Amino acid sequence: MIVTFIVFIVVCAAIVVIKISFRGLMGEYYTAEDFGIQTIYSSVDFNGNGIDDYTDILLGARADAKNRPRYDGAYHAGGYPPDNIGVCTDVVWRAFKNAGYNLKDMVDADIKANIDEYPRVGGKRDSNIDFRRVPNLMVFFQRYAVSLSLDTEDIGEWQPGDIVTFSNNHIAIVSDRRNSDGVPLIIHNAGQRNREDNRLTSWGGISGHFRFDASRLDESELIAFIE
């Protein structure tokens, strides 16, 4: 009986290894399931579309990646650049818009009420650009999101829809797709051709890792995006 059990375990392990190796040769990506990682879903569906917030954020970021807006950080009156233009921060507010959140207005409201917490603003608010600056978004997420591990070897801690900031003033959304080591891809805009790529560990030092759990916040802190 023990020998049979051991053989069964060995065969199962071999199947997993063969599966992963084959997919690697085919140039495919991997999923959390391939590494025995449980995907975390939000308990909140803010826009009531039947899709949880984390998945909505992921899908919103992926839609922007597929759209491939031209990299351009020019100032825009009204704050929002057109759909064919964007930078890394635009991936984030568009991702949140897909989940029903008006990230611009939420950031603006917090800066107005707590301007001393936002050194990048320098005491002078500008709602047209403040939400498109990585240092400001980092402060906002430090205040309103759950801060998580920066250790990329702890692959189970990195979940779809998470936000990651880098020390070189860059920001991205964590993908549900993973490389052969189980490290997730990131969705971001640095002007590169492929906006969903394997750069979590090679882009630069990671300065923040956040998960926006709206269930932890007061309803007054959540602002819906109204078209």
Image (spheres, rainbow, N blue to C red):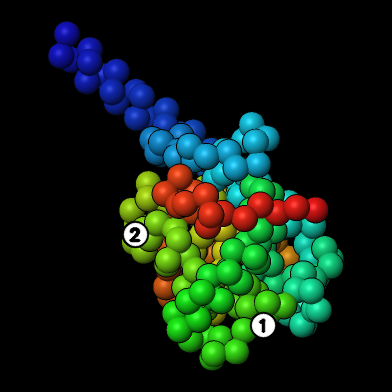
Disc 1 secondary structure class? loop
Q: Position of residue 201 (x, y in %)?
A: 45, 66
Say which quarter of the image contains residue 45.
top right
Residue 67, compared with residue 189, is above or below; it is: above
Which residue was labeled with disc 1? 126
Residue 20, can we see it? no
Mark 1 Cα shell of 10 Å, populated few (<14), some (14-19), many (≥20): few
- Quadrant containing the N terminus in the rendered view: top left
The residue that appears at 61% across and 50% down in the rendered structure is 57
Q: Position of residue 71 (x, y in %)?
A: 75, 74
Residue 152, compared with residue 24, is above or below; it is: below
Which residue was labeled with disc 2? 149
The residue that appears at 59% across and 64% down in the rendered structure is 106
The circle drawn on residue 180 is none
Say which quarter of the image contains residue 137.
bottom right
Tell which residue pokes out farthest to the left in this image. 2
Disc 2 secondary structure class? loop
The residue that appears at 45% across and 52% down in the rendered structure is 217
Q: Position of residue 157 (x, y in %)?
A: 37, 50
Residue 130, compared with residue 123, is above or below; it is: above
Left or right: 85 as drawn, with respect to 159: right
Q: Nearer the viewer, mark 2 or mark 1?
A: 1
Q: Amino acid at mark 1?
A: Asp
Q: Amino acid at mark 2?
A: Ser
- Cα–Cα gap, marks 2 and 1: 32 Å
Left or right: 155 as drawn, with respect to 6: right
